[in-house]
Image (spheres, helix red, strand yellow):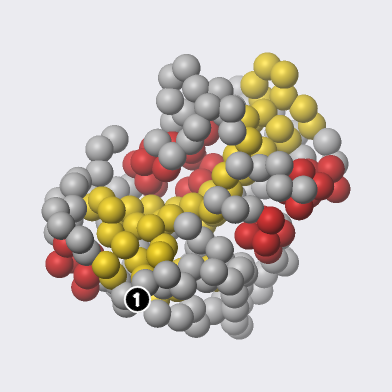
Amino acid sequence: MLDRNQIAQRISQELQDGWYVNLGIGIPTLIANFVPKGMNVVFQSENGILGMGPFPFEGEEDADMINAGKQTITPLPGASIFDSATSFAMIRGQHIQLTVLGAMEVSEQGDIANWKIPGKMVKGMGGAMDLVASADNIIVAMSHTSRSGKSKLLKSCTLPLTGVRCIKKIVTNMAVLDVTPDGFKLLERAPGVSVKEIEAATEGRLIVEGRIPVIKL
């Protein structure tokens, strides 16, 4: 199966030159480390940064330069820093070509739940609801199953929703899938993972057509 860095590396293949891209907390932040050589992509963080680079080397961290997940980051030449109101004006104004988010659950209709588990303390919903309401192109980076082995790709989400029918593509540790009107369409599988294993790990409807290629990194 893919590890966190490999999930991010696979999603980096979806980037296009000249795009503005918002990276959510968790696995998505790793994508900044895997931008294809020669490609110009501008990463935006909802806490007010445009032009994020890769994570800093140990000993070179600046505690004041962080992403939305409070991880230290590096600014690229020409980066700009601004308040969160300006940041969300960019998001709500649909100036971001791609949003990548983590998730706890995704339904076969493209619903996403990623902000709250009932009974557990949370600081707030963050900016995810603005992102899913404003973006046309949303990719989810997540584990295919929970630690107990329960599927996180469901017929219907059981957790409070962040957005409805908004997810376009999912990259998990097991597979790459499109969200279609008919369910999850399997596009690629992780090395060493069989189609049957993916079917067993997917509660929602899974569409398998023809030979499924292995993910290439």
The one nearer the camera, 116 or 62, is: 116
In this rendering, does residue 108 appear at all?
yes
Residue 173 in the figure: left or right of residue 49: left
Furthest residue to the front?
181
In this rendering, does residue 33 appear at all?
no
Quadrant including the C terminus: top left
- Above or below 158: residue 24: above
Q: Position of residue 189 (x, y in %)?
A: 23, 52
Residue sitting at x 50%, y 32%: 16
Element type at marker 1? loop
Callout 1 crowding tier (Cα within 10 Å): few <14, some 14–19, many ≥20: many
Could you say which quadrant of the image residue 45 lies in?
top right
Q: Position of residue 197 (x, y in %)?
A: 18, 66
- What type is the residue that disc 1 sits on? Gly
The one nearer the camera, 74 or 161, is: 161
The one nearer the camera, 81 or 22, is: 22
- Above or below 168: residue 107: below
Q: Which residue is mark 1?
A: 204
Residue sitting at x 20%, y 61%: 209
Q: Position of residue 54 (x, y in %)?
A: 54, 29
Could you say which quadrant of the image residue 74 lies in?
top right
Residue sitting at x 36%, y 71%: 183
Q: Position of residue 116 (x, y in %)?
A: 61, 72
Residue sitting at x 54%, y 79%: 159
